[in-house]
Image: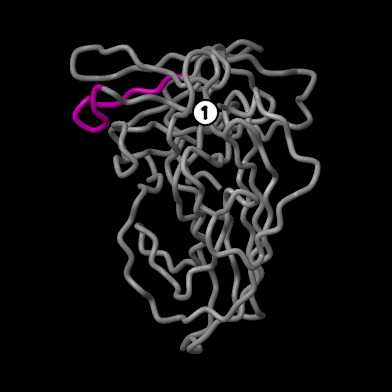
Amino acid sequence: MLASACALADDAVSTQAAKSPSANSPAVATLAPNLVTAPDGTLSLAIDFAMLRHWHIYWSNPGDSGGPTRVKAALPPGWTAEPARLPRPQVLGTGDDRAYGYEDSVRVLVPIGKHPDPMPERLEVTVEAQWLVCRESCLMGNAKLTGSVITQVRPAQPTHAFPEPSPAALRSRIEGTGVKRDLIIEAPVELVSETAIFVPGESHGAFLDGGSGPFSPVRREQSLVWRIPFELQTDTAGATDGRLRGLVLAGVKNLDRAFDIDIPIDEGSKNPNSQPQNRRIP
């Protein structure tokens, strides 16, 4: 059951020392002992979440209900940590109560930007994580993870695909110039499969017709086309960053590909045929 039918616990669950989920802490976060390599080759910290059976945590956009999972790392001088990367989410729930998140387990990556060369054998890190975990009730979870991570990369078998920048064959644009506009996405069927859907990301100041989705395309010959009307929220214009974000999920499995959509609203509306470069979702 999703968070819209859940009662939040009054007290947050501390999981700083927890290694396995339990009835009191149905989701826990742990820091991987080694640095890992992200699918795009980026050196990264890995934070592993484990949940009790039938419990789930949420993607950066939780959907119709829930709360986003947040991860932030602090590194020593000479190192920089980039925004955390969450893998492609599962679509949870049915009907009008849909959410985006993860069941059983999931790994979140924190890419490392600047680092010393050569690197020391170990890296002292502090990671703070916050999440909402739900089943028939919900609990707020948090963890402050500190440790000495081995900088030698340890290979790991992926369980979820991470979003990729959109290739040239996947085109997105904004049509319209007023308060009401359309997000247009076009992709070859052979790239994204017949079951592809679009799930919106964190886009402040714009309301998509259809709410949090997910959105299915229309097939036109060998392409899939999404036309998603949206309305600029003029009362929250000061909060918008002028971009629409989301993912095109190719297939329904955790390891199926996912493509970032990150398009500037204003630039797209000035030229309906423009194709602004899609960038990775923070």
Q: Is residue 210 above or below residue 206?
A: above
Q: Quadrant of residue 19?
A: bottom right
Image quarter of the N terminus: top right
Residue 260 locus on image (x, y percent): 43, 39
Residue 151 locus on image (x, y percent): 46, 80
Name the foreground residue: 145 vs 257: 145
Left or right: residue 106 versus residue 220 is right
Numbered range of the magenta stretch? 184-194
Q: Is residue 173 above or below residue 17?
A: above
Residue at left offset 64%, top offset 73% = 146
Q: Is residue 93 above or below residue 38?
A: above
Name the foreground residue: 93 vs 181: 93
Residue 36 locus on image (x, y percent): 41, 69
Name the foreground residue: 275 vs 247: 247
Left or right: residue 239 versus residue 15 is right
Magenta highlight on residue 252:
no
Q: Quadrant of residue 254?
A: top left
Residue at left offset 51%, top offset 89% = 120
Question: Callout 1, which amino acid?
Answer: Pro
Residue labelled with disc 1: 200
Name the foreground residue: 109 vs 171: 109
Q: Is residue 142 above or below residue 60?
A: below
Bin the neighbour count of mark 1 within 10 Å (Cα to Cα): few under 14, some 14-19, many 20 and up.
Answer: many
Residue 137 locus on image (x, y percent): 65, 33
Left or right: residue 224 versus residue 208 is left
Left or right: residue 165 versus residue 228 is left
Q: Quadrant of residue 164?
A: top left
Mark 1 residue element: strand
Residue projecting furthest to the front: 23
